[in-house]
Image (tube, rainbow, N blue to C red):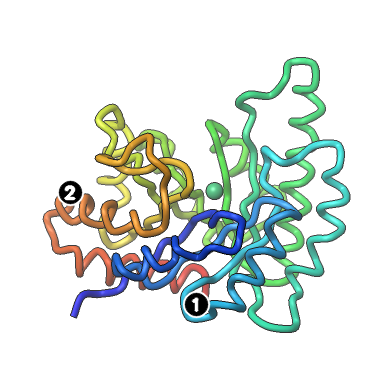
Amino acid sequence: MTQALIDSHCHPPSGSSTEWLERALEAGVRECIAIGTDLEDWGRYRSLANEFPDNVHWTAGLHPCHVGDDFEAHLTALPEFLDTVEGKPPCALGEIGLDFTRLPKEQRDLLIQQQSEAFTRQLILAKERDLPVVVHSRGTVPECLSILEETNFPANRAIFHCFTEGPDSLQAILSAGARCSFTGIITFKNAREVRESLERNGLENLILETDSPYLSPEPYRGKLNEPCRIDRIAEYCAEFFATSKEKIAEITRRNTYDFFGL
Ligand SMILES: [Zn+2]
């Protein structure tokens, strides 16, 4: 029997249709983790996880790109989701972190300050609840690592998702005791550096994600991404590590389960 796959990071679409989940199940992707980004999707993903408890896990956290003047309101609302008593609790706090790309020039300093504060405060919330965190970092690995250190957050409970940098950056994360997960970017022709990181990360340490609806793997690049495409990413990894897709499924599921405590 084929091993079931798990998508460790996706953003399921809003709306009542769950055809994306049917397509995932058909492709052998039995589980996914719906990653929250702000107040709008936390409740939605919690409901989804309660509707499909065997297939959908969920998280809540304020994404750095969603941090703005109203971040205080989001952070005030967050504990209610983290401390969900009825139904399935979240398996992590996230995604949180730092992203200084595309900041409007006149607000840049303020937004960097707000992102750092939101990141720090959410790490504290996670630590208090003994939850792992999903970190979003765009060219900000050193800054993220130093905030993890300053807040005394146990690095082995942090995953840098959608890793897109070279092996030196990967090594900095691994040396700190944290880990990384990889998306369909590894299949892109121009992603040689990311593949070097994948190699350095190694098969035994592998965790995969789609980050859907973004970043469809080749040959679907540019098309809408969905959790079912983890199958293609796993297939690519099987070839990359000269092993079977079953082995990729087994390893990535074990690592994802261990990290998120599933
Ligand atoms: Zn994401």
Return the residue nearer the eye: 166 or 20.
20
Q: CA distance from mark 2 to mark 1?
A: 27 Å
Q: Amino acid at mark 2?
A: Phe
Residue lying at the far bottom of the rendered structure:
86
Coordinates of residue 216 in the picture (x, y in percent): 37, 43
Q: x, y (%) of residue 60? A: 67, 61
Q: Residues within 10 Å of mark 2 (few under 14, many from 20)?
A: some
Give the residue pinned by disc 1. Answer: 262
Q: Residue 20: x, y in percent?
A: 44, 60
Q: Quadrant of residue 192?
A: top left
Outermost residue to the top: 105
Q: Amino acid at mark 1?
A: Leu
Q: Nearer the viewer, residue 143 or 25?
A: 25
Numbered tag placed on residue 240 in the rendering = 2
Q: Residue at x 62, y 34 (%)?
A: 99
Lateral position of residue 260 relative to residue 97, left or right: left
Q: Which mark is residue 36?
A: none
Q: Quadrant of the N terminus?
A: bottom left
Q: Is residue 192 above or below residue 153?
A: above
Q: Are marks 2 and 1 in contact (CB under 8 Å)?
A: no
Image x and y of residue 170, in percent:
41, 42
Q: Is mark 2 within 8 Å of ligand 1?
A: no
Please report the residue visible at 58 percent of the width from the left and 58 percent of the height from the top.
35
